[in-house]
Amino acid sequence: MLRRKVSYVLAVATGLCVGSTSLVIAQQSDPSSSQRPGQTADAGQPAQGSNMPQSGAQADQTINQQLQQFAQDPNTACDKLFVLKAATGNRFEVELAKQVQQKARAQQVKDVAQRIVQDHQEALQKLQPIAQELGVQLSQGLPTMKVQEIQILASLPSDKLEKEFICMMQADHAKDLTEYQAVSQLSENAQIKQFAQQCLPKLRQHAQLVEQAAVALGIPASNIGQAMPAGARIEGGSYTSTDNDRNR
């Protein structure tokens, strides 16, 4: 039981490290990505009428307060942390995908963005009653770093935005599939287990759509979902393949 708890904590905590260095470098290295007066959205401005997330200061405060409260109850901390992270991650992908819907030119990328918005908004709605039951306060905005990340991406020209978005979705869904698989098995909260189990099929569908878009854009395939097959079991920090997985 202790080993299962440790592996669950590690699975949840992994997502706390968010890297946006490549996005910042992309903006700094491309002169056309900096905002200048009179430029169009395609030349380095966020899409007009896109309802960009507002200042993240309030969200930062809400999240920090929640984390301090979680630490006071280790028995429920992992479940609460997962709910908080899942809500933030879903909200981030929705807001970013809305930008991509407006600025992208490749229809396949637009289709991926539309599916992301639809399914992750649905996931957010499902999280609300779970958060309320656990006493977790979900911010209606995004933390400052995520707001700035979207602003950087939205300022890129369309072709760069498309590739950055698809690359980010490759990485995010690889991480999400591993995390949600672990939570669906290791969480001791029935509602959270059910939520993770319900999300996994759509996450796998997203992964397939993202891989198809990546191929169309000339981005190397990442084999999302292959590292954690459906039906794999988490044991002692690693997963065990089922007989069907071994016979593939």
Image (cartoon, grey):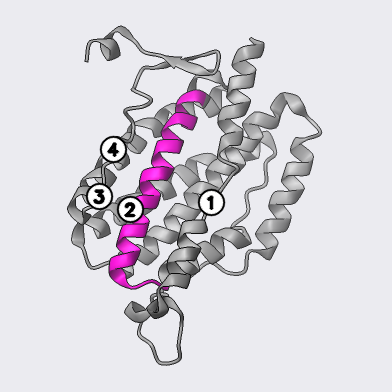
Residue 128 shows in this picture: no
Which image quarter holds the N terminus?
top right
Image spot of residue 20 (x, y percent)? 51, 56
Residue that numbered label 4 is attached to: 205
Q: Residue furthest right?
A: 72
- Front residue (pair 120, 47): 47
Taking 37 as reference, is 189 left or right? Answer: right
Q: Amino acid at mark 2?
A: Ile
Q: Amino acid at mark 4?
A: Gln
Residue that numbered label 1 is attached to: 19
Q: Which mark is in front, 3 or 4? A: 3
Other-residue count near label 3 (Cα within 10 Å), few / some / many at <14 / 14–19 / ≥20: many
Q: Amino acid at mark 1?
A: Gly
The residues tagged by marks 1 and 4 sit, at their Cα atoms, a distance apart of 24 Å
The residues tagged by marks 1 and 3 sit, at their Cα atoms, a distance apart of 20 Å
The residues tagged by marks 3 and 2 sit, at their Cα atoms, a distance apart of 6 Å
Relative to residue 233, is residue 132 depicted above or below?
below
Image spot of residue 164 (x, y percent)? 36, 58
Magenta span has 173?
yes
Chain-order first, disc 1 or disc 3: 1
The residue shown at (31%, 42%) is 206
Q: Are marks 2 and 1 in contact (CB under 8 Å)?
A: no
The residues tagged by marks 2 and 4 sit, at their Cα atoms, a distance apart of 14 Å
Residue 30 shows in this picture: yes
Relative to residue 30, is residue 67 depicted above or below?
above
Residue that numbered label 2 is attached to: 166
Q: Which residues are magenta?
A: 155-182
Chain-order first, disc 2 or disc 4: 2
Magenta span has 30?
no
Taking 187 as reference, is 36 left or right? Answer: left
